[in-house]
Image: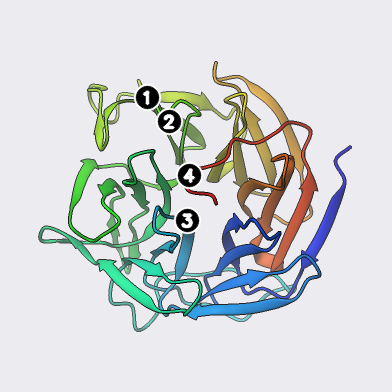
Amino acid sequence: MCAIRVLTDKLRFPEGPVPLPDGSVLVVEIQGQALTRVYPDGRVEVVAELGGGPNGAALGPDGRAYVCNNGGFHWPDPKGGALLPHGPAHDYQGGSIQAVDLSSGKVETLYTHCGEVGLKGPNDLVFDETGGFWFTDHGGHHGRSEYLGTIYYARPDGSAISEVLFPFRHANGIALSPDDRSLYIADSFACRLCRYDIVSPGVLADDGPRLSGRSTHYQSPTYRVFDSIAVEASGNICIGVVAAQGGIATVSPRGELVDFLPLPDPVVTNIAFGGPDMDKAYVTLSSTGQLLEIDWPRPGHPPHFAG
């Protein structure tokens, strides 16, 4: 049984945990529209006000925190104490990629478009060893219309962005294998994890028709909506599950379910590894505003530029 500690339950729909070397953890608060630091004693401090809907974060090669901003959601009154988004914010203007200086809180908007195509709902990102980053755009519903999801690759100085995969209807979590040769993407409402071979930075091997299913690495036999991803040192892929039973599903590099850890929130969105031995898992329980620290049974793989 994994030991579980609640670091705080005061967050407003947290996602994107980023463990820092001093033991604190960055999270984004989608409803709170902020990048926030949670200290080991539970103290919560806003690092930067971001507006819109900050949805995922990662440290970049320059030490800044890079944030996917989905543009913001509408938030009905919580039912039964659970906070859940419903459609785009009334003042939605599109999504963006932002960078935050952690010492000053200064925010720079790097991307709002790829060519003439506006970002709709940037969701999650991961840096490769060259300093470039892959990110998902979940798309979204607006009235009776749906914007399809996309996978992008970009440089952290704002100089280049390219569309890599389109369409990808409900692209959510994204992660790299420990050797940087495979890209994993969570296809939320299809309840599947996809895997693509990486040829070079920002370039994937041809996988045939996008809807062929050839990219499927693992398909859940039950209805488990997949959210964000972290990778263990062994190559196992850990996935936040949003469903009637929220939790963390762990899938092997061979595409087999290793285990499932149920957690007390139906909206378990993100997991990240930290601690001196990479044996602490930081998990966001979004509808109840919690950040957990879990003694994980296997060590995680540190992301590039984790500090």
Judge the density around disc 2: few (<14), some (14-19), many (≥20) Cα neighbours within 10 Å: many
**Front: mark 4 or 2:** 2
* Element at label 1: loop
CA gap between label 1 and label 2 equals 5 Å
The amino acid at mark 1 is: Ser
Circle number at residue 215? 1
Q: Please tell me which residue is depicted at 25% across the width and 38% down the height of the picture.
A: 202
The amino acid at mark 2 is: Cys
Determine contact: label 4, label 2, CB under 8 Å.
no
Circle number at residue 188? 4
Mark closest to the chain's N terminus, 4 or 3: 3
CA gap between label 3 and label 1 equals 28 Å
Mark closest to the chain's N terminus, 1 or 2: 2
Q: Quick one: quadrant of the N terminus?
A: top right
* Element at label 3: strand
In this rendered view, identify the residue nearer to me: 112 or 40. Answer: 40
Judge the density around disc 4: few (<14), some (14-19), many (≥20) Cα neighbours within 10 Å: many
On screen, residue 25 versus residue 190, left or right, reads: right
* Element at label 4: loop
**Front: mark 3 or 2:** 3
Name the spot of residue 170 as percent of width and height, x first: 39, 47
CA gap between label 4 and label 2 equals 10 Å
Name the spot of residue 287 as percent of width and height, x first: 66, 65
Mark closest to the chain's N terminus, 4 or 1: 4
Residue 245 visible here? no
- Which residue is disc 3 drawn over? 59
- Which residue is disc 2 drawn over? 194
The amino acid at mark 3 is: Leu
* Element at label 2: strand
Judge the density around disc 1: few (<14), some (14-19), many (≥20) Cα neighbours within 10 Å: some
Determine contact: label 1, label 2, CB under 8 Å.
yes
